Amino acid sequence: MAKQPVKLIDRLGQIGFGALVVLIFLYTIFPFYWALISALKPEAELIRTPATFFPETISFANFEAVFRNDKFLRGLFNSAIVSISVVLLALVIGSFAAYSLGRLKFRGKRWMLYLILSMTLFPAISILPGLFTVVNELGLYGNITSLMLSYLIFTLPFTIWVLTSFFKGLPGELEQAALVDGCTPFQTFYMILLPLVAPALVTTGLLAFIGAWNEYLFALTFTLTQPAAQTVTVAITNFTGVIARNEPFGEIMAASVIVTVPLIILVLIFQRRIVQGLTAGAVKG
Amino acid sequence: MAVAASTPKAARPGRELSLEARQARLALKLLLPTIAVLVIVAFYPLARTFTSSFTDEPFAQPDTPVNQVGLANYQRLLSFQLLLFPEEMSLRDVLPEPVNGSRYQRVQNIDLFGTRYVLVATDPDFITSVFNTIIFTFFSVTLELSLGLLVAMVVNARFRGRGLMRAIMLIPWAIPTAISTVLWRHMLGDNSSGALNAILLQLGLIQQSQAWRASYPLFSVVFVDVWKTIPFMSLLLLAGLQTIPGDLYEAASVDGATPIQRFFRITLPLLMPTIVIALIFRTLDALRAFDVFQVLLGRSTPSMAVYNYEKLVSSFQFGYASAVGVIIFILIFAFTVLYMSAFGVEED
C-alpha cells in the first residue's frame, strides 16, 4: 500500500520536470520562430490582428526584398570584414602577449596581468567621448578601420586572459627541449607552443568573432553620418525597406533571420568550445 | 621599465646568464603591441574623457573655443534634492536656488505615508536615467540569477535531448543584442499583431492589448534582457554545478536529507563562488546597458549609457557627456570594489 503514493509522486515529478524542460525550450526558441514566420508572412497577414501563430500563406517576398537592399548587403559585408580582421588582430597580438605572460620570466608580470584583466570590466560607454576623439584624430571617422581598432578593447583582454592560462598549462619540458635543440624563444613560441594551443585559438577566435559581429554602440557612433561604413547591426536597427512602408517589419524580420542563422549554425557546431571559453574566465575549474 | 634597464648589465658573454635577460627582453617586445593597443583604445580615451569632463567642449566642432568650467558639469548632473512639498504650496515656492545658473526642475512627486515630497534636480533627465538604470539592474540581475539557477539545475539533470538543449541555450547569447531587441520590439507590439499580446489574450490573462513599451517601459526592457541573459547565466552556473562532486549528494541522501535540504546545505554554499562572479559580471553589464534600452525604448526611457550617448551625439555636448561617462566609470568601479570586499573575492 505504501508503495503506491511514492510512485505517484515520482510520476508527477517526472511530468512536472518534463513540462519545465518543454517550457524552457519554447521560451528560448520562440522569438526565432516568430521572426521566421513573420518574415515568411505576406504583408497583409503580418499586420492582421490577432496575429496568426502559423502562417496561412508563405511568401518569400521579404527575403527577396532584403537581398535587393544595398544598405543591408553593405552592412553584412562590413560586419564580415570587421569581425574577421578583429579576430586576426586579437589572435596575433593576443598570442604574443599570452606567450609572454604565460611562459616567460620578467618583472612586473603580475601587474600586467591584472591590468589586462581589469580591462574586461571597462565600461565602453565611459570612454566613448574620448575614443571618438582618437578616431577623429586618426582620421578614421566613418571608416570601418575605426571599428577594427576599437573592438580590440573588448576582444584583446579576454583573448589574452584565456590564452595565458592555456600557455601556462603546457609542460615546461617542451620548451627546454626546443632550447637545447637550438631554437630561439620566439621560434619555440610559434613552431612548438602555438600549434599546441590551437584549440584555445579556435575558441577565443570564435568568441571574438561573435563579440565583434554583435557590437552596436561603437558601430553606431563612429559611422553616424556614413551609411557606407555601417555594420549589419546598425543597418537592421535603422532599416528602411525596399518595399515602401513606414516600418517594414517583414523585411526587418527577414534580415534578422539572415544575420542570425550563421550564428546559430556556428553555435551548434562549436557549442562545447564556446562554453569552455566562456566559463574559463569565470569558473576556474 | 625596469626590465629594459637591467638588460645591458646582464648581456655579458656566458649564455646561461643572458638567457633570462633575453627572455625579459623578448617578453617586453611581445607585449608592446598589446600595450600600444591598450593605450590607444583605453587609457588615452579614458584620460581624454576625464580632462574634457571639466570643460564645455562641444562635439565635433574643432573651431569653437573650449573653456575650463571646473566642476560645473558634475554639479549640474549631480545636484538633486528631496523636498517636502505640501499640497497647498506650488512648486515654485519650494524650489531651491539655482546651481551655477541652472535651475532645479521636478523629477517626480513622491508620496510617503501621506506626506508629499518632490524630487528635484538641475538635470532631471540624468537623474531619471540613473533611477531607470538602477531599477533595471536590480530586477534584471535578480531574475536572471534566480531563474538562471533553476534552468541550470534542470539542464544538469539527466534527460533525453540534454545536449541539444544546452546547445540551443547558447543561441540567445550569440545573437546580437541589438537584433534580438528588434525582434522583441515587434513581439511587444501595441496591438494583438504583437506576439505577447496575442498569447496573453489567447490564454485569457489580459482582456485587451497593452502598449507594453509605452506603458511599462522598464518592465519591457527587463523582460527582454532576462530572455537574452538567462541562458548564458545558467550555462555559467551549470559549469559551477558540475564541479560539485556527486557523492556529496549521495551521502546526504543516505543520511536522509530532503531535496530542499540538499539544495540549501550543499548546492547553494558550494555554488557561491560561481554565483558571486556571475553577480558581479551581470551587475556591471546591467549598469552600462545600452543596446537593449536604445533599440527598445529610444530616447523615451534612457539608461545612463543612452543618456550619455544622446548628450554626445544629439546635443553635441562633448564635455558634458564626458562627465556622464566619468560618473558611470566611477559608479562601476565602486560597485566592483564593493562586491569584491563584501564577498572577499580573490582576483583570480
Image (cartoon, rainbow, N blue to C red):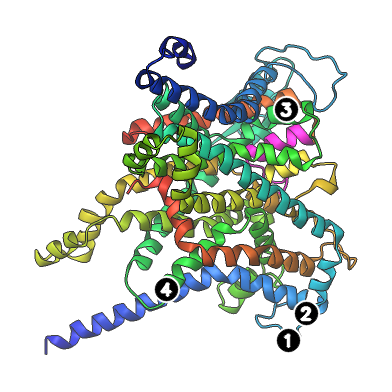
Give the Cα distance between marks 3 and 2.
48 Å
* Neighbours of disc 1 within 10 Å: few (<14), some (14-19), many (20+): few
Q: Which residues are magenta?
A: B298-313
- The answer to whether residue B300 is magenta is yes
Going from N to C along the chain, the mark reached first, 1 or 3, is: 1
Contact flag, marks 1 and 2 (Cβ < 8 Å): yes
The residue indicated by pointer 3 is: A134
Q: Decide: marks 3, 2 in contact (CB < 8 A)?
A: no
- Return the disc, 1 or 4, that comes first in the chain's sequence: 4
Which residue occupies the extreme right position in the image? A244
- Res. B288 visible in picture: no
- Residue nearer the viewer, A24 or B132: A24
Residue at 54%, 63% (x, y): give it. A267
List the residue tagged with mark 4.
A21
A231 versus B19 height, above or below: below
In the drawing, what numbered circle is on residue A56? 1
| Residue where numbered disc 2 is placed | A45
Would residue A184 be visible to someone looking at this image?
yes
Q: What separation in Å lies between label 1 and label 2 (alpha carbons)? A: 8 Å
Q: Secondary structure at mark 4?
A: helix
Residue pictured at 72% horizontal, 16% vertical: B55
- Which chain contains the residue that carries disc 3? A
C-alpha span from label 2 to label 4: 32 Å
Q: Position of residue B129 (x, y in %)?
A: 63, 38
Q: Quadrant of residue B228?
A: bottom right
